[in-house]
Image (tube, helix red, strand yellow):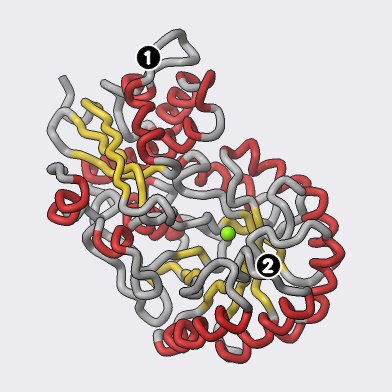
Amino acid sequence: MKDNLIKSIEFLPVNISASNWSQNTCIVKVTDNAGRYGIGEADGSPSVIAAFADCETEHKWLSNLTESLIGRDPIEFDANWDLMYETTRWIGMRGFGMFAISGIDMALYDLAGKQHNLPAYKLLGGEFRDKITPYFTLYPDCASDSEPEVALKSYESLLKKARDKKVKAVKICIMQDAKMTKQQVVDYLKECRKMLGNDIDMMCDFLYRFTDWQECRWILDRIKDVDLFFAEAMLPHDDLEGHRKLSEAVSTRICGAEMATTRFECEQWLKYSGVSIIQPDYNRSGGLTELRRIMHMAEQYNVQVSPHQWKTGITAAACRHLHIANKFTTYVEYLHPDFYDGSLRKNLTTNEAPIIDGCLEKPEAPGLGIDINREFYKEITGKEF
Ligand code: MG
C-alpha cells in the first residue's frame, strides 16, 4: 500500500447562516494512506453536496464520486478530474455534481502539495508573478432594496478604509432590489468615484439589473469620466448576444460568466460574448484543474480570467496560488476579512494573508498553505475536524 494514495474523501458541511453564501460551505477533506490530508470546499447547499458521498453506484456514468478516487494518486490532476467527470456524468455534468468535483479537485492540490513539499502554485503551472493584485468586493451594509442615498452613506466608510489601506482596486455594487432610474444609476456611480478618488481602480457589479443592452450602453456612455475598470453582470447571464452587442458598442470592459461551469460553457463566452473578462467560480466551475484549462483557452482569446470568489479562507488560499500561475489577468476578486466581517470567512482557516501595499504575497507553504481552525470548527459543528 503506497503512502501517497488516496484513502478517503469526506464532505463536511458547515452552515452558520444560509442567508449568505460565505457563511456556509461544504469542506472537502481528502486523506492519504499516511494520514496526511488536503482541504478544499464546494459551493451550493452544504447538505446537498454532502449527499454525493452517499450516492449509490448504478453504472459506469453514475458511480459514487468519493469511491472513484480511492487508491489513486492525488497529483494526477487531469486524469482524476476526467475520471470524476465520467463517473458522475448522469447526475453531475453541471450543477451540484460539478460543485462537488470542484471541492475535491481543490483538496487534491493541497494534499499533493503537502506530499511533495511544494506550494500549490507550482503544481498549477508555476510562477508568472511574485504577488497577486486583488480587487476587493465591497458590499454596503444595508438592505438589498435600500435607497441609493442609504447605500452611498454606507460606502463612505468602506471607501475611506480602501484608500487608507492603499488597495489598488475595489468593486462596488448597485443593490439588487433598489428601485433606481438609469439617471440615478449614473449619479450613484459618479458619487462612488468621487468618494474613492481617482487613484484606485473601480469596478461595478450591476447584479443583473438590466435586460436591454441599449439601456446599458446609455449608462456607460454617460459615465466615461468614472472610468470603470469593468462593468459586471449588466445583462442576464445567458444573454451572450446582448453581451456581445454591448461589448462592441462601448469602450468599458464588460465582464461576466460567474455562473459558467466547465471549460465547455466558458468556451461559449469566449467565442460569442465579446467580454474582456470571465469569472467562472472556484467552487462551482470545476475547481483548479478546470480553471487552469479555462485560463489557457482564454489566453487565446485575449480574455482575462478573474474567478468569482465569495466563500471562506480555503478558497481565498486557492485564489492566491492560482493567480501566481495566471499570466494575463490584472486583478482578481478577493473576499478579505479586513473588508468583510462574516465569522466563517474570518475564523474558519489559519494563515490569513495580510494586505501589503494593496497586494497579497506569493504563498510558499506546501499545498494551499492553510489549515482549519480546529477550535472554531468544533464550536460551530460540535465535531472534531
Ligand atoms: Mg458578481
Q: Is residue 223 above or below residue 351?
A: below
Q: Is residue 283 above or below residue 215?
A: above
* Dot 1 crowding, Cα within 10 Å, few <14, some 14–19, many 20+: few
* Dot 2 crowding, Cα within 10 Å, few <14, some 14–19, many 20+: many
Q: Can residue 350 be seen in this view?
A: yes
For badge 1, the amino acid type reads Glu
Q: Which residue is drawn at 82% across and 77% down?
A: 221
Secondary structure type for disc 1: loop
Left or right, residue 208 beside residue 84:
right
The residue wearing badge 1 is 56
Left or right, residue 112 beside residue 215:
left
Q: Can residue 135 be seen in this view?
A: no
Left or right, residue 343 beside residue 273:
left
Tell me the quadrant of the picture where the C terminus can be found.
Answer: top left
Q: Which residue is drawn at 58% across and 73% down?
A: 146
Tell me the quadrant of the picture where the N terminus can be found.
Answer: top left
- Front residue of 297/201: it is 201
Residue 187: percent from left, percent from top: 72, 84
Gap in angstroms between the C-alphas marked 2 and 1: 44 Å
Residue 174: percent from left, percent from top: 62, 71
Residue 191: percent from left, percent from top: 64, 87
Query: Of the numbered discs in the image, which one, if any, rests on residue 231?
Result: 2
Residue 55 placement: quadrant: top left
Residue 45 placement: quadrant: top left
